Image: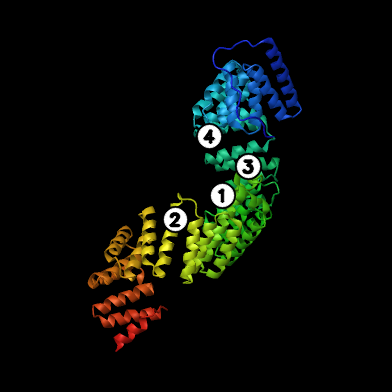
Amino acid sequence: MPVAIGAKLPTPPAGERKVVPERRRMEQIYFFCEGKKRLLLGETNDAAYCFEKAIKADPYCDACYYELSNIYALANRPVEARQLAKAAYMLDSANVWYTLHLAQLCADAGADARYFFKKTIAQNPQIAEAYYGLLTLYDAQGLYEEAEQLLMQHRQKFGTSEANVLSMQNILFKQGKIGEAIAEVKRLTALHPDVQQYRLLLAELYGAAKSDSLAFEAILQAKELDSTSYELQVTLSDYYRRTSNFNGYFRSLLLLFSSEATPALQKLQVLAFLQRFPSVEHDYTATIDSLYALARAVYSYRQEELYATYLLQTGRLEYALNVLKLITLRGENDESLRDVILNGQKSRFFSTYAGESIAFYEVWQLYLDLLISRQEWDLLLHEADGYARVLPDKYRAFFVKGISYFQQKNYPDALNAFLQAKKHHAAPADTAFLVKLYSSLGDAYFFLKKYAKSDKYFDMALRLDAASYSVMNNHAYYLSLSNRKLKKALKLSKATIDAEPNNPTYLDTYAWILYCMGKYADSKQIFRQALVKGGDKEPVMLEHYGDVLYKLKEYSNALIYWQRVVESGGDSPQLQEKISKVKQ
């Protein structure tokens, strides 16, 4: 329950502690007792008010600061809780509970609370919480030797508990002391022979020690205790995978996924792991299909995104597109998901849907990227509108629409869409997107023959990323097509081939600029490099090379390359005229 108190927290006065008048002391006692009573009744706000009144009566009441700190901590207001805890500690640093409380709050905030935990243990070695609080810090900071010594100290004080042994084996394992870790877990299996968890942990440690036979023996012992537990199938599947027994591995995965006890996150992690090994997916496609069918029984946007990716990896593009489309439709009508998308951490569904909302964004990006790769421009325009309805970053929708219009040679609408994307984009630090946007604006303005604005946006893109060679190449090529600033074009193009000397597209641009400058022999030499490096399959490049040969009066060779353009399906407006001219 939120604490509704004033913004200004009570703080103890500086200087020596003073004795308050009897009337105020009695008032403090009354409000303190009333506050404790309100806490027992669950009336947190009223309790906080009473403790504040008690502090006002006696600003040296350390217990009041402590109680108020606990209220703020439970209300998830850690900054105020620490401030009040420090006040209680300053007033009575000998109080072990104040020290421990401050240590825990500091540790939760990521601060180094080792001093306070150590002091707690020194003040009262019987408080087990202090040992484990300090242990957590040692573990997080990689101070494993100190952690091991602390656990031994705890063992001497409290005896050998299950928690102590489990913590010790974890710390030993992290130090590479696998043999000693195994000894710790064997101690547990001896003390608790009917606990399957310890047998499985022992199997995992034997596996880490590459003692596969002992690992399998421990798994069989665990199986005798409970053959149906999902933890058993997890350990068994790990064993089969480690020993490259893929038939056994997938058999155990099917049992694991069939169990209602297996958490959905566990299934998700397994499937994500499998996607890292496409050759295994290829060999066991039917079984993995079954795993996905079992996992998808419980709907999850992350799960569906993973499934769509799997379909793409296995060459089932149409199925993948259908799955992605269904995800976007579901998300558009999912009020909880949309609330998280619109309100972020303020949404009451945030804890449940935070990961789901990220997956939903990624699904949209994948879906739109696939439509672009398939050149489905009309559908892309329609889906971009859907994106804008559901997701707040509308600039991406406008950008995608701009791409669609541009590819359809509808340059006025493309320009308008790109300008809308620029208007709605409010993240100047997102330079990668801005480079793409400015470059696209340069493209659109060029085809509308607004060359000054085209140059302006290409220059803006290159100021953001001076190493964007694709932008350099396009700018240089457009300058050559409009026969402007050829020296600048040559300089830009030269930078691209210096960076990527085997890129046939960049070589083609450089060679074409040389052609426009009348340097035909140099142009021919670069074009030959471009053709050797893969450009011989590009109709535009073949036509350009024919143009150079024509200028060098190699008419028959020029005709050969122009005819190859026709044979490959290319046909620029001037091509047939060039061919006819040579034949005459």
Is residue 457 visible in the rendered image? The answer is: yes
Q: Quadrant of the C terminus?
A: bottom left
Q: CA distance from mark 3 to mark 1?
A: 14 Å
Against 417, residue 551 (above or below) is below
N-terminal label among 3 and 1: 3
Marks 4/2: CA–CA distance:
48 Å
* SS state under label 4: helix
Q: For marks 3 and 1, give the one nearer the viewer.
A: 1
Q: Amino acid at mark 4?
A: Phe
Q: Nearer the viewer, mark 2 or mark 3?
A: 2
Q: Which residue is mark 3?
A: 219
Q: Indicate whether 164 appears above or below 573.
A: above
Residue placed most toward the observer, 113 or 90: 90
The residue that mark 4 highlights is 173
Query: Looking at the image, which residue is at 49% across and 71% down?
Result: 408
Upstream in sequence: badge 2 or badge 3:
3
Residue under label 2 = 434
